[in-house]
Amino acid sequence: MAGWKSLKDMTVLSKPLPRLDGPDKVAGQAKYTHDMHPKGLLYAGLLVSPHPAARVVKIDASKVRRLPGVKAVLTDVHPTGTVRYAGEEIAAVAATSPEVLEDALELFEVEYETLPFVADIDSAMQENAPRVFANRPNIRDPRVRGEGDVDAGFARADAVVEGEYRTQVQTHSTLETHGSMVYWEGDELVIYDSTQAVHGVREGVAKFLDMPVNKVRVVCKHMGAGFGSKLQPGRYTAIAARLAKETGAPVKLMLTRKQDFLGGGNRPNSISHVKLAATKDGKLTAFYAKTYGTAGIGTNAGIRLPFIYTIPNWKHEHYDVFTNAGPARAFRAPGCPQASFVMEQLMDELAEKLNMDPLEFRLKNDSNATRQKEWRLGAKKFGWQRRHKKPGADTGRYKRGMGLAASIWWPGGRGTKATMTIYPDGTLDVKCGTQDIGTGTRTYMAMVAAEELDIPMKRIRPMLGDSNFPKSGASGGSTTTPSVGPAIKNTSERAKTKLMDLAAQFLGVPATDLAWDSGTVYMKTNPVKKLTWDELCQLLGTETLEVHGQWVEGLSSRGVAGCQFAEVTVDTWTGQIQVNKIVAVADCGLILNRLTTESQVNGAILQGISYALLEERHMDPETGTMVNANYGDYKILGAKETPAIEVIFYDEPERGVIGIGEPPTIPTNAAIANAVYNATGVRMYELPMTPDRVLTALEAHQFAGKED
Amino acid sequence: MIPNNFEYIRANSVQEALQLLSQKGDGARLLAGGHSLIPAMKLRLNAPETVIDISGIQDLASIHRDGGRLHIGALVTHRTVETSDEVKSSCPVLSEAAALIGDPLVRNRGTIGGSLAHCDPAADYPALTLCLDAEIEATGPSGSRTIAADDFFVGMFETALQPGEMITRVTFPVLTRGTGAAYEKFSHPASRFAVVGVAAMVTLDGSGNCSSVRVAITGAGPSVFRATKVEQALTGKAPDEQAISDATQDVADPADLMSDISASAEYRAHLCSVLSRRALQRAVQAARG
Ligand SMILES: Cc1cc2nc3c(=O)[nH]c(=O)nc-3n(C[C@H](O)[C@H](O)[C@H](O)COP(=O)(O)OP(=O)(O)OC[C@H]3O[C@@H](n4cnc5c(N)ncnc54)[C@H](O)[C@@H]3O)c2cc1C
């Protein structure tokens, strides 16, 4: 198989093209799961536990059943009857309207035996704290990793820095909450799901319901964000399927915003005790970290230390801590934003101790060749040389500062199948059982086929988000584009071969005598003998041409670098941080669509700023539930907080396709934290950097309130 | 996010609204802009049996100046206060403050009467009303009475309004030469309500000293309050930077303030000082013309 064309030969790919479904989305025509209203639809909802730890003693649903408009009730939806976080599903109802549904949910009478709980990591780690799981301590056994001899590394260092850093729990806050609309066609189940994995949900729900996989179909045409929280099948889908079976009607069950906050996933917090050392010529010698994180009742609260730097001797002990809170889920670059907050600030502290510029110090310890170039490129575009050499140099109320931080990501492409159907009128469908979770998958599917076949985009109908289409994996780990892009290219090439065979037959020459150019097949020795795309397709007569292809090695690769620079202004009277500008350098091999790729970087930065300054799940120690489970209290970044963003692509087309969704969200928080230090001379050891935390830190350094 | 069932009635005059209020009793609620009532109903924190919609009563939707007094009808929206030429020239601080309320949707619907009657501890108008020494006109079955702002705000979500009464208008002083006012607000990042808001009004005498100072603070405590210590410290003094800075060192005691997830009591106390200083500086500037 051929590789990708060179950038200069591309006419469609790697151009900045608007997404094909953009107009529909803007006009409200794109139908999300939330928008599905088939005739006879029943509205289902969950009753969830208000208690963080309890045993369900009795559920009395008699009043619910008597309410006119209630069509089905389930009281056996909790698998064990022992609740471990506020928000676990206890019962479900299907009703004829959302109004009846809400009244019905108030009529359940549930008797709970409440149990002691731990609402946050600090209380969970105390001696004699109530256990989340009776038979297991809250602090799990450590996972220990490392290399070299840490003691020797510290012993030969000239400078050491250490500290404790904390990051918060952040919820995914997808604008479309989790949920499904389902109906039965005979013994076959159709599911419209807000999901990052149509095939995964199909397999998972089939298992939940003990059904054959081929009797379950999952559809997701448009998706209101996932960020990792919608990679798995939801219990709500199986519940909706049972309600639909019982009533014989279509049923929609979407989690409420509050339920989504409580149980829809989150990024674990982290507490890191860390120590980093270097020699006076600026070479890192040793790193030690002891970290804790809570994934609620789940696991995998790890933090990816020592991040990106080359350190000969390091050791990292990590402890997951159970708390009575909703389980964490994969969240855009799991474990990485936490790690950049810790490591990039430590790097700055150490650079200062060594009297070195933070950039120079990084160049000495970063072994990634791409990033070496990106650091320099970004520094130049950003104007790093304008940075105050002395932190807190501005006088007066407002202080400006600059900071930087690195990014990284690993996974590449993997098995994906696709089908192309070519019609006699010259149009074609490209089908792939992937999903467009807002990243522009649909659009580049058409772009790849258009580029390979040299035909206009408008002739191509990209089709995805359906488990009836050839299998592709979950859209997670930034794997979608390096999986789907090559699969479409491979399918297009095979289509080309088949069409050339057809042309050879028609022209009565061997296919090897033919060549393909600009959507036309011609004889190499006699180029006037040719068939245009339309003529070729007409050869199909009344048939269609079906071609199958798949992901193949060599068109994608893995591993990206990247770095970011931030400029902030700190109001020393109030502690407010304003981000003025972010410059991001990003690489992802061959960029398929420059516009949607830039959108990915922009979005990742916005989520990074939101993480740095605004978002935090607050658990009430008294009740053990989240107190800010709504957007009036849980602030996510909006237009007002959005700075100027400049995205610079570092093109490496020779590497093939690589994903970009996650890495650019990693460095933003740390670049901002380093900029805050540069502005004020005060280091922020805890996220988010809210005004009162900043002010407290400033006051401790006696900067606050000075209006000189 | 769906209210309980309720009866909806539209009142076309103050008279009709009052009649309905007395007829329907405790289970009835007036509906003005709906931007406090409806959210509470959707969360089922408030479940009135009857909602009396007064938003169409034209008599309560006008602004007019009468000599030294500026009358604002109870149903005048935040947006109208923000943009009204009459308000901008008679009492500019009100326009300035209205522009800081919530977002455009809230400002287009929310009303001054609704805001004062609701008496949210983080609302903006209570600070302006108290600082500017405004008067609230309450109308009930037995007629209208005037309540001084100092007597109106009783506590969290609690006012001097009696059952069966409604606010019909609010009267502010027209600010003339020698008097200036300013409002400084630190907004909650999500809701835009005041984490702390400080309104200050200063009147200068012939020699440039403060003959009167009023400072009112919202968002910080369970209810709006006057910063009497600051007022006393500046009254009779020349309001130079140093004097203002000295007077605003300890405006509020954290022990009296609220602590929640958006700000600790200590941080609120700090904001009280910072915002008082800024508000007073700007009020003095305005007074000097
Ligand atoms: C997202 C959001 C952000 C907001 N941000 C701010 C902010 O930054 N600052 C701020 O100050 N406010 C803010 N608000 C509140 C907003 O200003 C409300 O509009 C206001 O508090 C209530 O006015 P209303 O006309 O909407 O009253 P309604 O909601 O209709 O009524 C509120 C209460 O007052 C009663 N009532 C209404 N009118 C009268 C009357 N004439 N006489 C007696 N009782 C009456 C009602 O019965 C009800 O109990 C915000 C609201 C929202 C939803």
Image: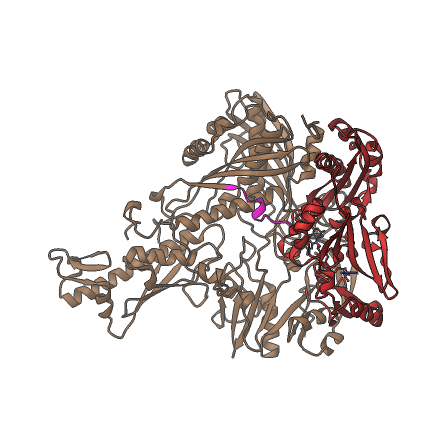
Chain colours: A brown, B red
The correct choice, above or below, for A562 with respect to A538 in the image is above
* Residue B144 percent across, percent down from the top left: 85, 60
* Residue A524 percent across, percent down from the top left: 14, 55
Please tell me whether residue A636 belongs to the stretch shown in magenta.
Answer: yes
- Front residue (pair A686, B171): B171
The correct choice, above or below, for A379 with respect to A476 in the image is above
Q: Is residue A315 visible?
A: no
Q: Quadrant of the C terminus of chain B?
A: top right
The correct choice, above or below, for A521 with respect to A633 in the image is below
Residue plotted at (38% across, 58% down): A445
Q: Is residue A274 visible?
A: yes
What span is colored magenta in the figure?
A635-644
Extreme residue toward the left, this view: A526
Please tell me whether residue A589 belongs to the stretch shown in magenta.
Answer: no
Which of the 4 quarters of the picture holds residue A275? Answer: top right
The secondary structure that dominates the magenta segment is loop
Residue plotted at (39% across, 46% down): A557
